[in-house]
Image (cartoon, rainbow, N blue to C red):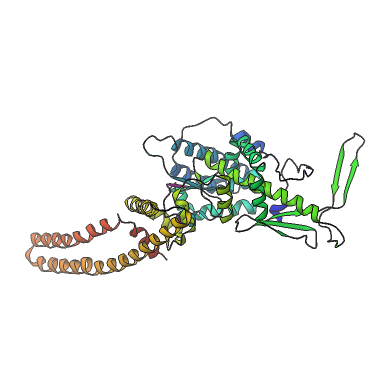
Amino acid sequence: MARDALHQPAAGVPFVLPIGRPHTRPIYVDPAVQALLNVPRLSTQPLPVLGKHRFEVFDHTEHDRDALTDGAAGIAVAVAQALTDLNLEPDHRPTILWNDEVDADRLLGQTLLFADHVCVPDRVFAALIDDRDDDAIHEAIAEQRRLRPLIEAGVIVPVPEALGIAARVDAVNAMTQRDLQRRDLTDWIRSQLIVEGPTAREAMFISAIDDLDSRQMWLLSRRTVFDEDPHGRGTFTSRLLGTYDPAHDYEPWKQQNLDKAVGWHLGRANERLIAGEVFTADYLTTSPFQARLLARKGALPDQPIHAAVWADIPILPTADPATLARAAAEEEAVEDLRQKVRNALRGARDLGTGADALTGLGEDLAHASRQLQRTVRTERRWKVIAPALTGLGAIALGAAGGLPAIASGVLGAAGGLVPYFADRANRRRNAAYLFYLANRTR
């Protein structure tokens, strides 16, 4: 946390005077990100192709930072372009969700495979753009390797969030400034903030109730010195990590930090919303605080599956990436599950009743999957093993009658297995089969 909090942007830290009300700085766009917006448009590649290419880049450039940066930047631009083109498909506009708060595989299972694609932050791209150290980059690559089956299937899509924000940075800034003028909104956010500090080293931490974002940290310097060089250029020098002074009035500093925190939360919410629009995805928050904030803003996405975030869904959220990728490939079963989700949510009045409906659906499908597991065991015993043994016996007896008798025995054994394979094909069309797959690997 300390490393992230003390990371200094390449352009330096601007000196801003307090204005006595909630505010935020305009978004700074890194020149490297801005340059990517002007890259010539190339032919669009499907998301699964880009997913496989991503790991080819990692395999060949992980220890060559410059080559890795070039490869990651190229993939970032291509992914943004591919998502934009998906929205233009005339026959079928895919369901695309966007979230930056929880593990991608857990979100995919929690939302019952409802989305065709789930966008998550490309943390490799972000680490390279922010000039993080090698450990941070390798950690981000390791996380994407963990999700490799889903990324290569095009189900999980790491997206360059900074690129999405930069593409419409003026819209984000304008939206945040409008929100800051709403006293009802800023007062509500302020009422949700928890302040810790000042600490013994004059640090203050502020977080929001029921939020998943890391708490923010401020350091107080009461020892600022101004120096002016012979050329008239002034420099402020501050000493941080001081010592708590019980005689000092920290209240003005606290109120100043609360104003900044209110502005930060509004700005961050708008960044997420606009990034979702750029990537043609619905922002699906898993944070109760963010959901309340978006609802008060009037910006809670009209996406019924949002209710699944608050539902108690068994089995699928804890499935490993390889199992989820296999389940997502069962197209008929996935479509059956999505239809069952739509039916369950048809009468839901709000997120709460929708969550209750999906909790019930999840329990029903989990129960059906356990029944299916027992059925499979029974069928293997009576529809596979028994016919196979009978067929082998017929083949052995037919050996005395020559080739025609053996062929007859083989055909009889194969015919005895036909009902089993027919039942198996029917099972794979049912939503419960997806829960069965996930449960079998636990």
- 157 horizontally vs 409: left or right: right
Question: Residue visible at 77% across and 58% down?
Answer: 203
Q: Nearer the viewer, residue 244 or 438?
A: 244
Q: Picture quarter containing residue 20?
A: top right
Tell me: 7 left or right of 100. Answer: right
Image position, residue 117 (x, y; %) = 45, 46
Q: Is residue 194 visible?
A: yes
Percent across and percent down for residue 166 are 61, 37
Q: In this picture, is 99 found above or below 416?
A: above
Give the quadrant of the N terminus.
bottom right
| 432 inside magenta stretch | no
In the rendered view, tell whether residue 333 sits above or below residue 370: above
Q: Nearer the viewer, residue 56 or 74?
A: 74
Looking at this view, name the residue that lies furthest to the front.
184
The boundaries of the magenta stretch are 110-117
Rendered residue at 73%/47% (across/down): 8
Closer to the camera in the image, 103 or 283: 283
Q: Residue at x 44, y 51 (%)?
A: 305
| Helix, strand or loop for the magenta stretch, by majority | loop
Q: Is residue 112 magenta?
A: yes
Q: Give how far across and how far down residue 237 sits, in percent.
A: 85, 47
Residue 195 drawn at (x, y percent): 71, 58
Task: Count numbered badges in the picture.
Answer: 0
Q: Residue furthest left?
A: 401
The quarter of the image holding the C terminus is: bottom left
Q: Is residue 68 visible?
A: no
Relative to 319, is 200 on the left or the right?
right
Front residue of 413/184: it is: 184
The image quadrant of residue 170 is: top right
